[in-house]
Amino acid sequence: MTFQSEPSSLSGRAVTFAHVNARWRAVALLAAGALIFAGCSAPTAGSSDLASTSPPSTDLATRTSDGGQVTVLATWSGPAAGATVAVSLDTHSVDLDALDLATAVLRNDRGQTLSARPWAAPKGGHHRSGNLSFDGDTGAFLTGARWVELVLTGIGDLPERTLRWDVGP
């Protein structure tokens, strides 16, 4: 059953309720589609052209650096782990297979550094994970240190990332 309204004074023709409802449905669908598209293409919370380093909320051993199109997660289990850090890289726009991380440095509060060995991480395109180990006297490096930092260079669009762990008082 179709109801007709009085002819519109503006258009001079009858408008059916079904026709009005179809028009509103089309407008609502277009608006919903626009909102969904805008949500998918908007920057995510925490995305930035600058590296951010933040302590994790649940794992005290993991640090995160997000920015420059690549997210870095680094997990160091403390002095018992020695000079080995588990590193995971994640991106949606950069090929990570060419990265070696051999330029990484482990630095302490006394200014001492340890140089990285080649990164033992299988190739994975946009996702790579593996242990990063460092050469040097780990015992002397960690003894009496208040903190250690992992310094990574050349990952994504950022020149340098620094992730820090507290070791002692």
Image: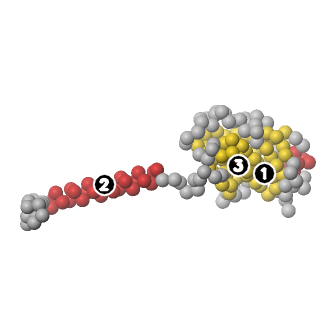
Asked if the residue under mark 1 is in contact with the one under mark 3, i.e. CB atoms within 8 Å, the reply is no
**Residue 168, percent across and down?**
85, 59
Q: Which residue is mark 3?
A: 161
Measured Cα–Cα span from mark 3 to mark 1: 10 Å
Judge from the rendering whether residue 105 lies leftward or rightward of residue 45; answer left or right.
right
Q: Which residue is mark 1?
A: 149
Are there few (<14), some (14-19), or many (20+) residues within 10 Å of tag 1?
some
Q: Secondary structure at mark 3?
A: strand
Judge by depth and name the residue closer to the eye, 132 or 158.
Answer: 158
| Tag of residue 70 | none
Answer whether residue 12 is visible to the viewer in this image: yes
Q: Which residue is mark 2?
A: 29
Judge by depth and name the residue closer to the eye, 154 or 22.
Answer: 154
In which quadrant of the rendered image does the C terminus lie? bottom right
Measured Cα–Cα span from mark 2 to mark 1: 51 Å
Asked if the residue under mark 1 is in contact with the one under mark 2, i.e. CB atoms within 8 Å, the reply is no
Q: Residue at x 70, y 49 (%)?
A: 161
Q: Amino acid at mark 3?
A: Arg
Q: Secondary structure at mark 1?
A: strand
Instruction: Single out the mark in the foreground, 3 or 1.
Output: 3
Q: Which is more N-terminal, label 1 or label 3? A: 1
Judge by depth and name the residue closer to the eye, 45 or 68.
Answer: 68
Q: Amino acid at mark 1?
A: Glu
Q: Residue at x 67, y 48 (%)?
A: 73
**Residue 12, percent across and down?**
8, 61
Q: Residue at x 91, y 48 (%)?
A: 140
